[in-house]
Image (cartoon, grey):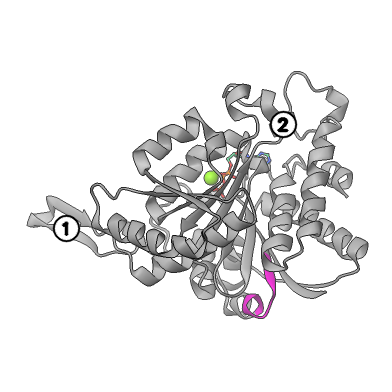
Amino acid sequence: MKKHIVVIAGDGIGQEVTAVGKQVLDAIAKKYDHEFTYDTALIGHEAIEATGNPIPDETITKSKASDAILFGAVGHPKYDNDPSAKVRPEQGLLGIRKALGLYANLRPIKLFDELLSASSIKPEILKGADILFFRELTGDVYFGERGRKDDGDTAFDTMIYSRYEVERIVIKAFDAAMTRRRKLCSVDKANVLESSRLWREVVQEIAPRYPEVEVEHQFVDAAAMLLIKDPKRFDVVVTGNLFGDILTDEASQIAGSMGMLASASVGDTTGLYEPIHGSAHDITGKGVANPLASVLSVALMLDISFGMKEEANAVVDAVDSVLKAGFRTRDIADATTASDKILGTQAMGEQIL
Ligand code: ATP
Ligand code: MG
């Protein structure tokens, strides 16, 4: 298959980990006889320095013309103490999501068995946990009307969802459940919120189209508790923007390090694949960043955007066997790992290749 990929490495360790991700794409193309072509584009601080704009028009044009985007990170410490800076690296990420209409954020939470001992949660609770979150990205309180009244002493944010917004992400979640263990948990607060009642209604309407999928509804408070108590009970979880924001951060701890977690932002066109971690300037340039989140983002790209299941599994299997062989980057190393197996970014990448 022929595919065109735009690589937007961005800031900080984004450059280092994305380089490894691209090498993995090349290896897959070679092994499975695909033709992958690449372009690069600027974003974030890097783009501000070069053009004054965190999301140059050229980046959007190139992205729209591609089959998928491999994304690194945006951010720079110089903005941390300057909340009033009008032009900021993060605008790059929000800008590209908006320009491409990426409405669903997929975050697989999977703990590789080899990393069980690195977690602070009991192994018997974690072992086998494998959850795929679908967080809605374009609606909810983040985009509803907000403001102040009574001379500023009262504030409000409106939680708002349209049927169309709920339908499109719920359908994506059901489709994903069909390729997994055929369980879907929809998370809402329908005992209190009207937007949640609409959410639940839509899930119930769509469910009969997927008779093989076992559907459950959980209130967000119960879901937060169950994630820690019994993460194995979940397969696909679909929820709104606010609940998804909170629950996916909670769930990231099930998988251990930030350096292990990939995500996909998808809509109806080009998908964007990125590690959940940021630019991590504290370790930038040291060659120690864990590249596995970028490698696993490549697996998501192969699976979701290109429909290459076998290739995607090959990448995940490579991560699994490298971990089984005892290789670790510093962030996932623990006392039981021999020090000669602690590798830097590139050396870890070579093991994967
Ligand atoms: P940003 O402002 O872009 O979010 P950040 O400096 O907050 O970046 P994060 O990526 O959010 O950094 O990560 C927090 C910390 O976790 C980092 O400072 C770093 O030490 C560690 N970390 C994050 N990603 C990785 C990785 N891939 N490998 C190793 N350590 C990582
Ligand atoms: Mg951060």
Give how far across and how far down residue 254 sits, in percent.
57, 34
| Residue 148: image tag | 1
Left or right of 235 on screen, residue 298 = right
| Residue 113: image tag | 2
Give how far across and how far down residue 213 sits, in percent.
53, 54
Kindly report which numbered mark, 2 or 1, lies closer to the viewer in this rendering: 2
Quadrant of ligand 1: it is top right
Residue at 53% x, 59% y is 174
Looking at the image, residue 279 lies above or below residue 145: above
Left or right of 158 on screen, residue 81 = right
Give how far across and how far down residue 16 sits, in percent.
75, 51
Looking at the image, residue 299 lies above or below residue 292: below
Is there any visible trace of residue 115 in the rendered image?
Answer: yes
Magenta segment: 62-69
Of residues 281 and 318, the one drawn nearer to the viewer in this rendering: 318
The N terminus sits in image quarter = bottom right
**Cα gap from disc 2 to disc 1, whole angstroms:** 49 Å
Q: Three-letter amino acid code at disc 2?
A: Asp
Q: Three-letter amino acid code at disc 1?
A: Arg
Give how far across and how far down residue 3 sits, in percent.
77, 74
Residue at 63% x, 51% y is 180
The residue furthest left is 150
